[in-house]
Image (cartoon, helix red, strand yellow):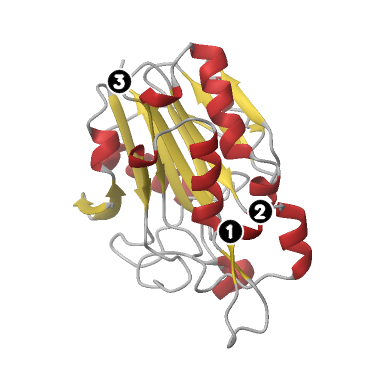
Amino acid sequence: MLHIKRISQITLLGAPALEAAPGVIHAFSTRRAEHNEFTLGPNSSTNPAIQINRSRFLAAAGMPGWPLLKLNQTHSGIVRRMVDTGAANEPFEGDAAVTDVRGAALGVQTADCVPILIADRLGRAIAAVHAGWRGAAARIAQNTVYRLVEEYRVSPSDLVAVIGPHNAACCYEVGEDVVEVVGDPESFVRRPDWPKPHFDQALANQRQLRQAGIPERQIIVSNLCTHCRSDLFFSYRREGGRAGRLLAIIGLVP
């Protein structure tokens, strides 16, 4: 479960399991601040208000002035290793990032897709993942765990993963083509009163994280649906192109 915090008029979410990891700081944003339109993206925006919002969010999360290492997200299976703070100026193409760089934040933006934050319980390395149905099909969550193990010699059994707010199965109707492409029929829900299958994004990614070796008890899944909870979250399916963006961040204390 996630808990809600209100810091400097900004409402954000945190997970005790990540807070327990030494030197790890993280947060999931909401749309709430002084108003209900606290958007933190897209990365391509040149709107000064969004840059100010991001700085305020980082400070509220406990990362004041930290560079935000950004991704040019394309719903891919690409996992990037961040070895310095270059991506703070020029986003790297990809949908997940791993690092052991301290004093910098990894961030992924969402508006219905799944944000996943991963940390080694000893505070040695972290990851941030953006996983929609295309990312699930590309097995990006599983590949991110493999990349953490490869780059930083951590054990999957020492990792904690938090699946943040997302468009849940209750609201995520898809076509049969998505079922085929994702290739994991157990992650889809069918009901007599639903004309089409619904995708359980959290379950699909949870299954991948387990397959990569993270113990089930160390995978925390938010039960907050971005589509249902218009009071807390933006939702592209609900609001279309005018939807703002949420941001999930994680970093290591210097």
Q: CA distance from mark 3 to mark 2?
A: 37 Å
- Assess disc 2: are there few (<14), some (14-19) or many (≥20) residues with their C-alpha within 10 Å of its C-alpha: some
Point out residue 245 in the picture as x, y percentages from the top left corner: 51, 56
- Assess disc 3: are there few (<14), some (14-19) or many (≥20) residues with their C-alpha within 10 Å of its C-alpha: some
Q: CA distance from mark 3 to mark 1?
A: 36 Å
**Kind of residue indicated by mark 3:** Val
- Assess disc 1: are there few (<14), some (14-19) or many (≥20) residues with their C-alpha within 10 Å of its C-alpha: many
SS of the residue at dot 3? loop
Q: Is residue 20 above or below residue 208?
A: above
Q: Which mark is residue 184?
A: 2
Residue marked by disc 1: 187
Name the residue located 28 percent from the left edge and 62 percent from the top edge.
34
Please tell me which of labels 3 and 1 falls first in the chain.
Answer: 1
**Kind of residue indicated by mark 2:** Asp
Q: In this rendering, does residue 131 appear at all?
A: yes
Horizontal side of 236 relative to 232 (left or right) equals right
Please tell me which of labels 3 and 2 falls first in the chain.
Answer: 2
Quadrant location, the C terminus:
top left
SS of the residue at dot 1? helix
Q: From the viewer's side, name the closer residue of 193 and 78.
A: 193
**Mark 1 vs 2: CB contact within 8 A:** yes
Residue marked by disc 3: 253
Q: Is residue 194 above or below residue 26?
A: below
Name the residue located 43 percent from the left edge and 74 percent from the top edge.
228
**Kind of residue indicated by mark 1:** Ser
